[in-house]
Image (tube, grey):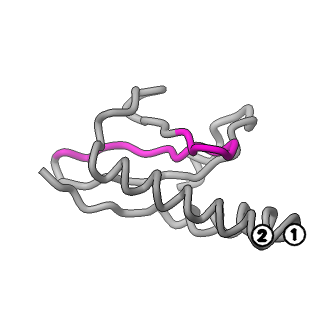
Amino acid sequence: MKYKMVYRPFVKEDLQNAVDYYKNISPKLAKEFLFRIKEAKNYIYNNPEADDIMYKEIRMHSLYQFPYHIHYFVDNKNEQIVVLAVAFSKREDLNFIRRQ
């Protein structure tokens, strides 16, 4: 069963901040980051319940090669995968979830 993938408002900002950071280092690195994001989103879309639940109903998928996680939950009732954040893995708090 394929669910629709939806994004909370701050996800775009999270991505843009990360891309800007990597672009300052190297445009090639920024492109690689975006490729890894696309790869991770495809994995989540095709395997929405494969990642472990980390807290409450929220799952976390680690990006290959970059220190970022995609935080999401599966909304079976509405047949959606809700992406909450793309977060730097060293982040100590979960306040990004509350901003939604």
Identify which amino acid the numbered label 1 is placed on: Asn
Identify which amino acid the numbered label 2 is placed on: Asp
Residue drawn at 69 percent across, 42 percent down:
67
Residue hosting label 1: 24
**Helix, strand or loop under label 2:** helix
Number of residues whose C-alpha sits closer than 10 Å to that of mark 2, classed few (under 14), some (14–19) or many (20 or more): few
Examine the rendered structure and indicate whether residue 50 appears above or below residue 39. above
In this picture, residue 29 sits left or right of residue 87: right
CA distance for labels 2 and 1 = 6 Å
Residue hosting label 2: 20
Q: Quadrant of residue 13?
A: bottom right
Q: Percent from the top left, x then y, of residue 31?
A: 66, 69
Q: Are marks 2 and 1 in contact (CB under 8 Å)?
A: yes
In this picture, residue 90 sits left or right of residue 81: right
- Front position in the image: 70 or 58: 70
Examine the rendered structure and indicate whether residue 37 appears above or below residue 57. below
